[in-house]
Image (cartoon, rainbow, N blue to C red):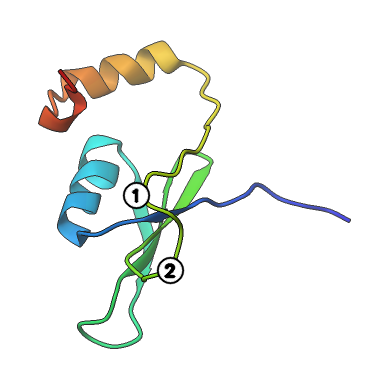
Amino acid sequence: MQTSSAIPLLRIFSETKAKEFYIDFLGFSVDWEHRFEKNFPLYLQAHRGDLVVHLTEHHGDATPGSTIFVPVIGVGELHAELTAKNYGYSKPE
């Protein structure tokens, strides 16, 4: 048997806010988007480097509040990059 990296599914509730967070803030790129028909829930794949995630608006997909662990080499540089963006939701105080 051969396996590849797991792809986490992350539940989203607002396409606009999800893209603001994952694309604009975290720096992911959208690979593709899918809807069964216009005005149906969004399902999309995005990546940053080797990390691939699926974001889904579909009821029953994933669990709100889930946690994933992503090993990062260069976490200091990533922290500096994200801090420099001054994103309002990254300040939990």
Q: Which residue is mark 1?
A: 29
Front tag of 1 and 2: 2
Residue located 24% across and 51% down the image: 18
Q: Is residue 67 left or right of residue 37?
A: right
> Most extreme residue toward the right, as rendered?
1
Snapshot quadrant of residue 78: top left
Q: Is residue 78 left or right of residue 7?
A: left
- Tell me if mark 1 has few (under 14), some (14-19) or many (20+) residues whose alpha carbon lies within 10 angstroms of its own: some
Q: Nearer the viewer, residue 93 or 6?
A: 93
Residue located 46% across and 58% down the image: 62
Q: Which residue is mark 2?
A: 60
Q: Is mark 1 in CB contact (under 8 Å) with mark 2? A: no
Q: Amino acid at mark 2?
A: Gly
Q: Position of residue 31 (x, y in %)?
A: 40, 59
Q: Which mark is residue 40?
A: none
Find numbered disc 1 in the image and state the secondary structure of the residue it sits on.
strand
Q: Nearer the viewer, residue 72 or 61?
A: 61
Task: From this view, report whether residue 45 is shown above or below residue 82.
Answer: below
Q: The N terminus lies in which quarter of the figure?
A: bottom right
Q: Nearer the viewer, residue 86 or 68?
A: 68
